[in-house]
Image (cartoon, coloured by chain):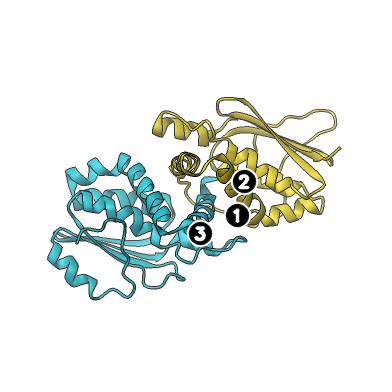
Chain colours: A yellow, B cyan
């Protein structure tokens, strides 16, 4: 089990309260070099077409590729997003924790292995590398009763919070 | 983070945008990916030739969970992809797959193989099925002969004639 942030009103994440089937439930080996290709792609698209185009592509990822998670969020089931985070941050061996209650889920990434892998591969990570998270999250929450806020806490660290819109 | 497991679905969205801009936009992107791949393959391919290519794709076979057979002899390297995880994920997708998704593979591998003076024959067979056969020859004439057997032969930007 991952380290947890356990506060008064929060319950820890474990297999019992996140026992839902993911639409994309990858297993097997993990090819971290794909993050290098993502970094190359971000640089290529922004240099050639501008940042709005890159953001539009991330928006499509949030709306279309992750349609299933978005549908769950629309229905108020935000735990599916937590399940997604847990599955894939575990697979990528990130240092993270998730706190969860009925109204809000907070993912804190202390060490993002995607960011670190790109830094190791190419040296300079695109300043827009984390937009993949920020913009995809925004699209996931768009037209749902929830908002997802992504705060960059430093290099390879962020906090992502999903909660009901005020 | 878009998980590395989902990179191909992100890739698919990028391809659809670029295809709408025109063929030269797609090709420019494939060349950029090819250049990126050079960083960890060009020296290996130059130094070890077919053996270096075998080493690279054997590593990919494991790390990308490919159902792929690799065969190396003195004249050529043959990769027989029985189940391609990349296209499989793009087809198993809530977003629309790009119709020519497979084309990107020859699009980045072809220019790289040209650079190391070997000769690629890329038979996608059927763009809707996650399988293909890739043969890389030392000898140009043998590659040209093999092209005649391909069911759906792929080209790539600035392919050597």
Q: Chain of mark 2?
A: A
Q: Say whether residue B10 is left or right of residue B141.
A: right
Residue named by callout 2: A87
Identify the residue shown where x is 56% and y is 53%. Answer: A26
The earlier-in-sequence mark between 1 and 2 is 1
Q: Residues within 10 Å of mark 3 (few under 14, many from 20)?
A: few
Q: Is residue B45 visible?
A: yes
Does residue A128 sit above or below A137 in this rendering?
above
Q: Residues within 10 Å of mark 1 (few under 14, many from 20)?
A: few
Residue B41: x and y in percent read: 29, 44
Q: Chain of mark 3?
A: B
Choose top left, top right, bottom left or bottom right for residue A124.
Answer: top left
Nearer the observer: mark 1 or 3; the answer is 3
Q: Chain of mark 1?
A: A
Does residue B117 sit above or below A97 in this rendering?
below
Residue B20: numbered disc? 3
Q: Is residue B2 visible?
A: no
Q: Residues within 10 Å of mark 2 (few under 14, many from 20)?
A: some
């Amino acid at each position: 089990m991952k380290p947890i942030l356990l506060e008064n009103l929060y319950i820890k994440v474990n297999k019992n309260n996140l026992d839902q089937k993911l639409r994309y439930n990858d297993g097997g080996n993990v090819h971290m070099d794909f993050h290098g290709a993502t970094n190359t792609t971000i640089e290529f698209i922004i240099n050639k077409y501008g940042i709005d185009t890159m953001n539009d592509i991330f928006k499509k990822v949030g709306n279309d590729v992750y349609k299933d998670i978005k549908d769950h969020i629309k229905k108020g089931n935000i735990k599916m997003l937590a399940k997604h985070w847990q599955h894939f941050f575990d697979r990528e061996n990130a240092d993270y924790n998730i706190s969860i209650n009925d109204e809000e889920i907070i993912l804190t990434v202390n060490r993002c292995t995607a960011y670190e892998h790109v830094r190791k591969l190419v040296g300079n990570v695109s300043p827009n590398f984390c937009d993949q998270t920020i913009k995809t999250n925004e699209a996931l929450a768009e037209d749902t009763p929830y908002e997802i806020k992504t705060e960059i806490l430093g290099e390879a660290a962020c906090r992502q919070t999903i909660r009901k819109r005020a | 983070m878009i998980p590395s497991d989902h990179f191909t679905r992100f890739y698919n969205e990028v391809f659809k945008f670029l295809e709408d801009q025109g063929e030269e936009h797609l090709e420019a992107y494939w060349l950029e990916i090819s250049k990126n791949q050079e960083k960890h393959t060009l020296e290996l391919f130059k130094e070890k030739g077919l053996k270096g290519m075998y080493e690279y794709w054997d590593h990919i076979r494991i790390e990308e969970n490919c159902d792929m057979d690799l065969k190396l002899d003195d004249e050529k390297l043959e990769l027989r992809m029985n189940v391609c995880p990349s296209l499989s994920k793009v087809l198993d997708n809530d977003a629309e797959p790009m119709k020519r998704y497979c084309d990107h593979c020859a699009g980045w591998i072809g220019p790289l193989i040209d650079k190391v003076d070997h000769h690629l024959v890329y038979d996608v067979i059927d763009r809707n099925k996650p399988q293909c056969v890739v043969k890389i020859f030392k000898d140009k004439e043998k590659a040209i002969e093999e092209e005649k057997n391909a069911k759906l032969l792929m080209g790539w930007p600035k392919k050597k004639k």
